[in-house]
Image (tube, grey):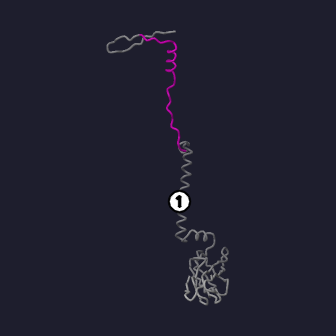
Amino acid sequence: MDVTSDVACQSIVNTPCPQTRFNAVEILSMTTMSSASPATVDEPVPTTVAEAASPKDRSSLSWFAALLISVNLLLAIAVVGALLWFGSLATAVQVLGGRPLVVDATTKSFGVAEPGQTVEVTFNLVNYGSQPCRIVGATVGCACTVPQDVPFSIAPGETKSLRMLINIPDDLKEGDDFPARLTLYTTIAAQPQLDFKIVGKVGGGDGQQVKG
């Protein structure tokens, strides 16, 4: 079925427009298109968790991030403070764990010494606790190792030096290793004893005494 429609046109010379013929199918199609809803604009797709979250969730995420930053900052301050006060993290862990008596080294060497020679090794002890502690005794691995000035006390914050005299046995030969052990006993319940090791080598006529 064809329907004829006059389309009015405006032109400068007022010339009538020619008739335009539409069939029923075309008219129905144009009517449907004109009544359709306008095209929607695609909304941007969130690319991050924060963009996809609701305002309440974003607030929670911000609070959690601020908490993490604060915790990390406090840890950094604690580490720096431990390094400045105790000198090392290992010492800080030991002292905070209830063992306030710290030594500069648990193993020391006297170098090279001749048979029959006496050498000296020194261990330095620091009391990082708030109470004085006392070294009440010592045991050695052999009679050739003699601790000096035992027993003695160490006040809070004080550093004491423990001198060890080592008499190199005459029956040792050049090139022999000389290991010796020492144990100190304290009045600290959480740190009842301290173990040390002294090492060195037996030399010939050119051996030299080394103080540790």
Horizontal side of 41 relative to 122 (left or right) equals left
The C terminus: image quadrant: bottom right
Q: Nearer the viewer, residue 135 or 11?
A: 11
Q: Nearer the viewer, residue 212 or 19?
A: 212
Above or below residue 205? Residue 3 is above
The structure residue drawn at horizontal position 52% and vertical position 9%, both measured from the top left corner, is 1
The x and y percentages for residue 140 are 67, 83
Q: Nearer the viewer, residue 74 or 10?
A: 10
Q: Secondary structure at mark 1?
A: helix
Q: Which residues are magenta?
A: 19-48
Q: Residue furthest left?
A: 13
Per the image, the residue denoted by label 1 is 73
The x and y percentages for residue 118 are 59, 89
The x and y percentages for residue 183 are 66, 80
Q: Nearer the viewer, residue 13 or 178?
A: 178
Q: Is residue 37 magenta?
A: yes
Above or below residue 116? Residue 14 is above
Name the amino acid, label 1: Leu
Q: Is residue 198 magenta?
A: no
Toward which corner of the image does residue 191 lie, by quadrant? bottom right
The x and y percentages for residue 75 are 55, 61
The structure residue drawn at horizontal position 56% and vertical position 89%, both measured from the top left corner, is 205
| Crowd rating for badge 1 (residues with CA inside 10 Å; few <14, some 14–19, many 20+) | few
The structure residue drawn at horizontal position 56% and vertical position 48%, both measured from the top left corner, is 61
